[in-house]
């Protein structure tokens, strides 16, 4: 175990713990999840930059901004009369458009990174672009965010292991389990809202 965690920094450890706290609170739709997300993201910026995963660092900047947006959406909503957002779904055409956009942007970013020291530019770009979309989906309480996260987290495990970020890889193994729980919880909340 010591060898496995030998390269883990205190910064990485704190960021990972706060990331788990974020997800556990998000599953229960507790607004404080966004504070944990914000602090975790700020710390992770530096961890990923040191690992030469620059798109992951950019993603963490985005996550920090989305934590503020998510807090606002979950507590005040978009300004409509109905208040904070509630769990809802998208039609298939929106998902197809979203997936096409993620694919095109991932290829574009990867092409732009080919002249840098960027590790695994296509996978890193995919994880970054897809995570940006999916974080926005969480802030808007779209049920399908959990399905997107399952795919993103599986790809992230490979990416982090390849760069020696074992604690982050372990975090995403835990995430794979938690996203299933999150999907079921939000699905039950949606069903309850529809029947009441």
Image (tube, helix red, strand yellow):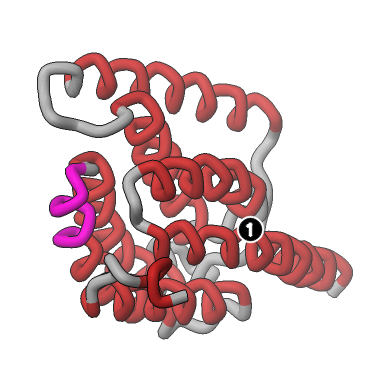
* Image: 136 above or below 47: above
| Residue ID at (63%, 54%) | 146
* Image: 86 above or below 129: below
Q: Is residue 150 visible?
A: yes
Q: Is residue 75 visible?
A: no
The C terminus is located in which quarter? bottom right
The stretch of residues the image draws in magenta is 45-52
* Image: 7 above or below 162: below
| Residue ID at (45%, 61%) | 139
Image side of residue 112 versus residue 121, left or right? left
Quarter occupied by residue 78: bottom left
Quarter occupied by residue 103: top left
Q: Residues within 10 Å of mark 1 (few under 14, many from 20)?
A: some
> As rendered, which of 171 and 64 lies closer to the eye?
171
User: Chief secondary structure of the magenta span?
Assistant: helix
Residue 1 in the image, given as x and y percentages of width and height:
47, 75
| Residue ID at (65%, 41%) | 90
SS category of the residue bearing label 1: helix
> As rendered, which of 159 and 101 lies closer to the eye?
159
| Residue ID at (43%, 53%) | 135
Q: Which residue is mark 1?
A: 176
Residue 21 in the image, given as x and y percentages of width and height:
46, 81
* Image: 107 above or below 99: above
Residue 60 in the image, given as x and y percentages of width and height:
26, 56
Residue 173 in the image, given as x and y percentages of width and height:
58, 60
The residue most toward the right is: 195
**Magenta stretch containing residue 47, yes or no?**
yes
């Amino acid at each position: 175990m010591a060898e496995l965690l030998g390269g883990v920094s205190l910064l990485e450890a704190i960021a990972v713990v706060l990331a788990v706290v974020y997800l556990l609170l998000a599953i229960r739709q507790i607004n404080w999840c966004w504070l944990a997300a914000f602090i975790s993201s700020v710390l992770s910026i530096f961890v990923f930059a040191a690992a030469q995963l620059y798109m992951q660092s950019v993603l963490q900047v985005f996550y920090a901004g989305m934590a503020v947006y998510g807090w606002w959406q979950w507590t005040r909503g978009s300004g409509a009369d109905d208040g904070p957002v509630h769990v809802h779904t998208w039609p298939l055409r929106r998902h197809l458009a979203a997936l096409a956009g993620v694919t095109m942007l991932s290829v574009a970013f990867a092409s732009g990174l080919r002249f840098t020291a960027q590790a695994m530019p296509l996978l890193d770009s995919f994880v970054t672009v897809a995570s940006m979309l999916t974080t926005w989906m969480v802030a808007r309480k779209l049920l399908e965010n959990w399905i997107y996260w399952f795919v993103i987290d599986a790809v992230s495990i490979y990416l982090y292991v390849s760069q020696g970020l074992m604690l982050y890889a372990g975090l995403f193994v835990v995430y794979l389990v938690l996203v299933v729980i999150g999907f079921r919880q939000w699905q039950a909340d949606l069903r309850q809202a529809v029947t009441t």
